[in-house]
Amino acid sequence: MLAYLSVIVLVVIQECHLSRLVFLIAAAAVPALCQVQVHLKTNQNTYLVGEPIFVVVDVENIGTEPVGYSSSYGHADLTVPGGRKKPAPNLFGCFAGFGEGYGGGGFHPPLMKPGQTVSFWFLVKGYNLRAGDYTLHASGKAGVLWKNYPGARSNNAPPAAPKHSETDPVEGQMFEGSLKLIIEDSTEPQLRQRYASYVADAEGWDMERRARAREAIAEMAPPFLEKTLLGLASQPESARLAVEGLGQIPTRESRSDLVSLFDNSTDLRLRAFIVRKLAGIGSNREVSFFSSLLAGRSTAVDDEIRKFAALGLGRIGGKDALKSLESAPQSPNPDVRAAVATALGNTKDSGAVPVLIEMYSDQSGSVQSAVCSALITLTHYQWCDGSGAAEELQDRWRAWWRSHTSQLPLYDSDQCPAFGASLPMVK
């Protein structure tokens, strides 16, 4: 499944502000202005009808300085001219529409060293492609940015002034190109075989592959994976994706499972999303269900309430609030855990630091980022260096904290350091 097209080669525009791909076997000189070089490819040579399609953006650091990288910082616009798009039901009439929207904490990406290559995967969405040959257009921005971690060095020399602001563009990160797609007719046994690896990855330990597989299954929503999607719906981090997939399977069983999810969920936003997906299907069998909602159905507390309860405790601060946050049940939802970390950073209590140090072992990147920001809020020191080595960092932090606890002033969210200020590094 990971056989890549071998005829795609990068051609870079002269000023290095835009990189394009052509179907030629050729070498291209790269201007010295470039910090990164981008290559595009598909994750397979050919696809079956109903199989997910990924564009892989390989980013090589060809400069002399490290750069931060994160998939959340990049984007790709993927279009297939002439490809059949998925139908989108209009639930809002001709002149109305709704927008949907906890995010917070700092951004602490790892660093890509000179000579290192990092790959970002983007799923082609919104299409039901039939068999045939297509051209896929890809344009966007690779997920790299200038990031400086002052003091993240082995010697005791004072940190040099950063050469770049985090808002400066990284030369070479913009890309635009065309890729050939070959889609072949498929049978259900063939598709089941192709999806076997996605199903395995969806429950695997590799977080990137797991997220990618779940996104692919939900986007394509093959009917034979209806129960797989239902299982994913029981996990908070993938529940919305699962509902998205179930809502694309127009069967009585799928609709019944969506109603059961609605009745068993305590997440008001998820329940609303389920209703929206069922409304898009528009089956007569759900008339009584929708009628019961008009009469009024309610739920118990949801994760949104838990998040703001945690943040309220952090705002109150002090020993009692700290105790409540520390003893709170471990939530399976990373957004709730991130909110607890943020709240601990607002308590202005020294006892929050050891708790936050232990929380950094969390497997969720959003929780780790919230821990980094909370420790900065409390101490006005930079704790995270972008290495991502949790155990090594925690050992260093524990030793540093033991030697600095008594003399270090503590702060809260009303006493934040100036944005962009150079903070001392925990070593």
Image (cartoon, grey):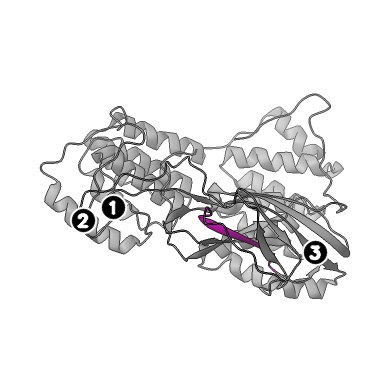
Q: Tag 2: residue type?
A: Arg
Q: Position of residue 365 (x, y in %)?
A: 45, 53
Q: Nearer the viewer, residue 229 or 81?
A: 81
Quarter location, residue 234: bottom right
Q: Which residue is mark 1?
A: 357
N-terminal-most mark, 3 or 2: 3
Mark in front: 3 vs 1: 3
Q: Are marks 3 and 2 in contact (CB under 8 Å)?
A: no
The residue positioned 59% from the left and 68% from the top of the image is 201
Q: Tag 3: residue type?
A: Leu
Q: Position of residue 37 (x, y in %)?
A: 57, 59
- Neighbour class for label 1 at 10 Å: few (<14), some, many (≥20)? many
Q: Are marks 2 and 1 in contact (CB under 8 Å)?
A: yes
Mark in front: 3 vs 2: 3
Task: Tell me the number on the disc at residue 181.
Answer: 3
Q: Which residues are magenta?
A: 33-43
Q: Which residue is mark 2?
A: 398
* 241 horizontally vs 391: left or right: right
